[in-house]
Image (cartoon, coloured by chain):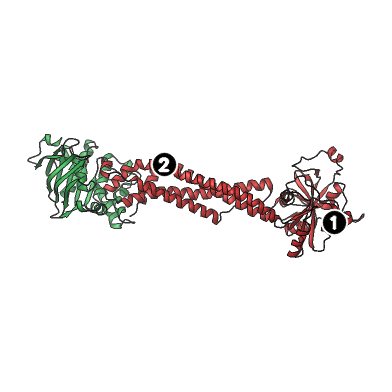
Chain colours: A green, B red
Amino acid sequence: MAGSALKLENLSVTFSGKPILQVPHLEIAPGTAVAFTGPSGSGKTTLLHVIAGILRPTSGTVTWDETELTKFGEARLDRWRQKHVGLIFQDFHLIEQLSPLANVLLPATFSSFATPQAVRQRGLKLLEDLGVPTATRSVTKLSRGERQRVAVARALLFDPPILLADEPTASLDEQSSINVTEVLASVAAAGRTAILVSHDPILVQRCARVIRLEHGLIVSDIAQTPSHPVSAEALV
Amino acid sequence: MNPLSVAWAMVRRYPATTIIFIVVIAAAVALGIGITAQERALRDGSAMASDRFDLIVAAPGSQMEVLFNTVFLRPSAVQLLDPPIVAKALTDPRVDYAAPIGFGDNVEGLQVVGTIPQFVNRLSDGLSEGRLFDKDGEAVIGASVPFKLGDQVTPAHGSEAFGAETPEEEEHEGHHPYKLTIVGRMKPTGNPWDRAVIIPIETIWKAHGMALGHAAGDTHVGPPFDPSQVPGLPAIVIKGKTVADMYGLRSEYRTTRSMAFFPAEVLYQLYDIVGNIRQVMSLMANVTQVLAYLAILAGVFALMKLFERQFAVLRALGASRTYVFLAVWLFASLIVLAGVVIGLGLGYGIAGVASHEIWRATGVSLEASLGPDELLLAAGGAVIGIVFATLPAALLYRGSVANLLR
């Protein structure tokens, strides 16, 4: 994973001719936890989608490990995303009719008919490590915090080098939020590039960089340490 | 890739809607299958019911009416064949047998049919119990008649269709009351004769005050008949000694005073009419099926809109467009296949019930079965449905993943 840096150059996303995101240059070193903050509509989620390859920029490039992702066709981008990116959403987006394990193993069905035993074992281990009851038949039986941990396990199934999370604690109660923050912090600490969009100060404080966007522009990019945390205004 | 779990989750997400879709398709398929299977059963059943009635000779009139009278025992007033023609037919040297057929009475609603023992044997290939009648006043019953051997019954004049007559009416018409003793039971024949009481033709003639077919004092029943003693008859069933004889007899009795026909000739006309009706009904059933698919298609479109965000998530997680397409297609195809399979069974069941009802009403034994036509129809329906299922799958996913995730 060493040397796999994420670079965005001259990136612009417009909608109906109106620019909604402009990033002249942004580089994220491998293994870094970065938080994007800013008010609603500032372009945080758009940026996350561009990095994930879900949204193609109007212009500019996104490069991962010297490979220009913006040149990829859709099918190749799908495969790259499956292998390199773990995505976590605010509302978990689990399939309610499936068990926690089946939800975690879902990405494995994208490319193979039968889920390999090793992948299955990894899914089980991830759930156990994250403290999710694996015997449950449906994720609807789980608490919201547990569901988000299932979503985290799903994102980590193929051990992706990049973890993208969009407001992962926003719909959780305080205790669940703290638990999920710990999980994400430990995941990021394991050498992954973790990019989080969040308004949650507890989560943002665990990130090495805090980048604030306003009106589609990066207005601040601050490295923080436990001894020099980001000010509260950067978090909202 | 394996999108089965996603497709199955969709089924489980909206089970009631899925069941309604399946029921609609099953009903549409069953209609088509039922019509085709029933029409074939009718065709086979009626052909089987009449295959022992080799050549029918009757007075000029409607062949269909005579066929219904003679084979299907649906009584109606028909003109009688002139005695000289009857006499000639019964004594023709080219015939293997010539069976006079006479009606007019009933026992507890069951048709009483007069004929000769040889024809009973021909119809039933021997008896299941008892013996053939060999004198006046004896009767052989059809396989489904609820009497026992040794039972004595008294026929009433007339038939159910015309209304049985009172003893006063009978007497006024010169009908003489008579008793019958059941001496034998036929094997099942699959035709309405299974519900008839078959007696010597001489008993019918005697009860109706007609010539008795034999010289005075001759009490035997069946052939040979005395040509000078035979009365008029509604019909005679003839089996020629050779095929050439059969055609020769048919040709010879096609005159201004008589008609002769093979039951198959009339049945083909009937099949032609029934076939045309079946074609129209099948067309209607097929249109219904297509309409059902279109309705389901609209329903699946609406349902898929509810899943749109979920599909966007799958795409965001790395699923290809093909994966999502297959998930939707599998979901719709599962509905179609379940509907078609259930429809096939339902159609078979409908044809079975209809066959039973027809048997109950007419005595014609029909066997509904699923043949290549029905399987082809169901397979065709499944293919159309599965092709239709690609439409929501192909058209659904055109929105931006990013927009759907917001």
Looking at this view, is A224 or B31 the one in front?
B31
Q: Which residue is mark 2?
A: B299
Position of the N terminus of chain A by quadrant: bottom left
Please tell me whether mark 1 or mark 2 is closer to you in this view: 1
- Crowd class of label 1 (few under 14; some 14 to 19; many from 20; radius 10 Å): some
Position of the C terminus of chain A by quadrant: top left
Tell me the distance, in whole angstroms, between the alpha carbons under discs 1 and 2: 72 Å
In the shown orientation, is residue A107 left or right of residue B243?
left
Residue A42, horizontal then vertical, whole percent: 17, 37
Q: Quadrant of residue A233?
A: top left
- Whether pointer 1 and pointer 2 mark residues with C-beta atoms closer than 8 Å, the reply is no
Q: Is residue A146 in sight in this rendering?
A: no
Residue A235, horizontal then vertical, whole percent: 14, 36
In the shown orientation, is residue A134 left or right of residue B184?
left
Which residue: 84% across, 60% down?
B91
Circle number at residue B87: 1
Q: Is residue A121 in sight in this rendering?
A: yes
Q: Secondary structure at mark 1?
A: helix
**Residue pushed farthest left?**
A227
Q: Secondary structure at mark 2?
A: helix
Q: Give, as a three-letter code, the residue at label 1.
A: Ala
Looking at this view, is A89 or A40 the one in front?
A40
From the viewer's perspective, is residue B67 above or below residue A14? below
In the shown orientation, is residue B77 left or right of residue A64?
right
Chain letter of disc 2 in the image:
B
Q: Give, as a three-letter code, the residue at label 2.
A: Gly
Chain letter of disc 1 in the image:
B
**Residue pushed farthest front?**
B256
Residue B385, horizontal then vertical, whole percent: 44, 49
